[in-house]
Image (cartoon, rainbow, N blue to C red):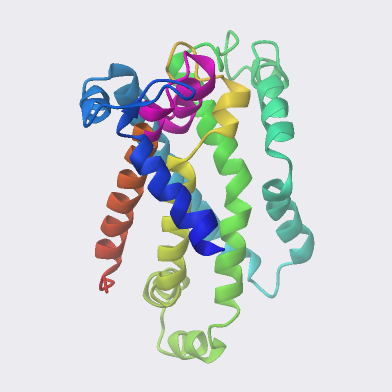
């Protein structure tokens, strides 16, 4: 089953990346698709946008999830269960449903602009979906809102498995909460931080649903991602499954590259 549904499609898509054409008229073209990939400005725009999401969003999400997990692990906090549920709920909502809601919230006459205008924070509505900069900000906010709770659960579960006597000993030695966080909590959560970082990296590099439903990759190609570009090559433009497969392998290379970097930064041995 693994060979049939995992390895066979991977090998077939690799073979497909060396072909061009559509339908049954695929012909072997060697490395033409890979040469085209290097010279394709739209592909590099998609890579640039995806890396912006990756660097900003993943970093912000990991930090927020870590801080929230520490706060919600406090035994003295009332309604902890309610707060945990509220923060976790976004990640179990429908991708399409929440994307559509965000599209309306961040529209020119949406609720967010009305609130900001009423509070005199802005003097005119922000072009959240039609300005290249603000469109990227909207996508980053949407992804962060959805996945912070997912990562928070991993950290929260790990925090509850840390022996409380370690913190008690640190308090006796005069360690402040700040010192306990950086000297005990983060080192103890290091394997989980590495895991969530890699999973978040993979998810962000494969980002598709939010961009497709909120901005459709616009304005222009300002929010276009690699996965959306693959979709366009396969179904929107004249179908070119060979080149689409080539672009998909660029995602594989990026995921491997960033995963290796994260292992190196975390000090893990690659075995």
Q: How many marks?
A: 0
Residue 65: x %, y % from top left: 54, 56
Q: Is residue 6 above or below residue 215?
A: below
Q: Is 37 a magenta residue?
A: no
Is 166 located above or below residue 57 in the figure?
A: below
Left or right for 265, reference 146: left
Rendered-image quadrant of the C terminus: bottom left
Residue 229 lies in the magenta stretch: yes
Image point (69%, 54%), residue name: 88
Q: Position of residue 161 (x, y in %)?
A: 57, 82
Helix, strand or loop for the magenta stretch, by majority: helix
> In the shown orientation, is residue 15 left or right of residue 167?
left
The magenta span reads: 225-245
Say which of 113 and 48 sits in front. Answer: 48
- In front: 125, or 157? 157
Task: Give how far across and how far down residue 237 sits, in percent.
Answer: 48, 14
Q: In the depicted view, which residue is nearer to us: 229 or 198?
A: 229
Q: Is residue 55 visible?
A: no
Residue occupying the point 33% across, 56% down: 259
Question: Extreme top residue here?
Answer: 124
Judged left or right of residue 41, residue 230 is right
Q: Is residue 145 left or right of residue 180?
A: right
Can residue 23 be spotted in the picture? Answer: yes
Q: Residue at x 46, y 52 (%)?
A: 8
Image quarter of residue 142: top right
- The quadrant where residue 110 appears: top right
């Amino acid at each position: 089953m693994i060979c049939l549904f995992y390895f066979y499609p991977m090998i077939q898509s690799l073979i497909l990346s060396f072909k061009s054409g559509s339908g049954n008229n695929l012909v072997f073209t060697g490395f033409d698709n890979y040469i085209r990939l290097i010279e394709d400005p739209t592909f590099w725009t998609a890579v640039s946008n995806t890396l912006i999401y990756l660097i900003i969003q993943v970093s912000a999400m990991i930090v927020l999830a870590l801080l929230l997990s520490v706060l919600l692990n406090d035994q003295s906090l009332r309604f902890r269960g309610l707060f945990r549920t509220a923060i976790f709920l976004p990640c179990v909502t429908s991708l399409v449903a929440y994307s559509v809601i965000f599209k309306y919230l961040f529209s020119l006459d949406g609720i967010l602009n009305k609130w900001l205008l009423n509070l005199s924070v802005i003097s005119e509505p922000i072009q959240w979906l039609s300005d290249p900069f603000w469109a990227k900000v909207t996508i980053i906010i949407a992804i962060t809102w959805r996945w912070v709770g997912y990562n928070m659960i991993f950290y929260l579960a790990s925090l509850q498995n840390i022996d409380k006597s370690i913190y008690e000993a640190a308090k006796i030695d005069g360690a402040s909460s700040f010192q306990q966080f950086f000297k005990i909590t983060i080192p103890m959560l290091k394997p989980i931080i590495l895991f969530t970082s890699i999973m978040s990296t993979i998810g962000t590099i494969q980002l598709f649903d939010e961009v497709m439903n909120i901005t459709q990759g616009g304005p222009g190609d300002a929010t276009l991602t690699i996965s959306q570009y693959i979709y366009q090559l396969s179904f929107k433009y004249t179908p070119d499954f060979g080149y689409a497969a080539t672009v998909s392998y660029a995602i594989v290379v990026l995921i491997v590259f960033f995963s290796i970097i994260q292992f190196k930064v975390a000090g893990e041995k690659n075995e």
